[in-house]
Amino acid sequence: MNDFFPNTLSYIIGNGAANPYSEYGSRVIFYMQYFGYFQADIGMIGDYSKYGIFFVLTGLFLIFRIITMRMPAEISFVKYMFAGTLLMSFTGSGFFSEP
């Protein structure tokens, strides 16, 4: 699941959504259908392989920004929600990914 295209640009912007017309996409779809492996199951690593380093860094920046932001006490629960999202992104589904 962590195979990349042979160019450097794939590390920066990712491989994109899997489609059956490329060797990489057909392999990812094969793993999804026959083994039940999804890129979203491996957290930020799956997001990195699909969307690239810009997506992962932007997601981390937004979450850290919200967690460290000053908020009124009435809505401070938002920080805890984003802290939970950050912790879950290491082990399960990433920031905005879906299986």
Image (cartoon, grey):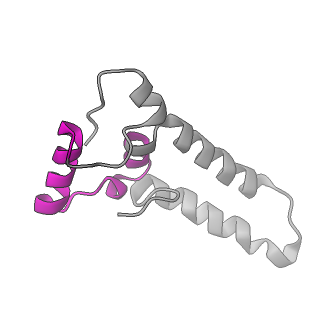
In depth, the one of 1 and 63 nearer the eye is 1
Q: Is residue 8 above or below residue 40?
A: above
- Figure label count: 0
Percent position of residue 90, x then y: 45, 52
The region drawn magenta spans 21-49
Percent position of residue 44, x then y: 44, 48
Asked if the magenta segment contains residue 46, the reply would be yes
Q: Is residue 15 left or right of residue 56?
A: left
In depth, the one of 54 and 77 nearer the eye is 54
Identify the residue at image location x=33%, y=58%.
41
Identify the residue at image location x=74%, y=56%.
66
Q: Quadrant of the C terminus?
A: bottom left
In the image, farthest residue toward the top: 7
Q: Quadrant of the N terminus?
A: top left
In the image, farthest residue toward the bottom: 74
* Secondary structure mainly formed by the magenta segment: helix
Q: Is residue 38 above or below residue 5?
A: below
Identify the residue at image location x=46%, y=38%.
52
Identify the residue at image location x=41%, y=63%.
98
Percent position of residue 76, x then y: 79, 71
Q: Is residue 94 left or right of residue 19?
A: right
Asked if the magenta segment contains residue 43, the reply would be yes
Percent position of residue 89, x then y: 48, 56
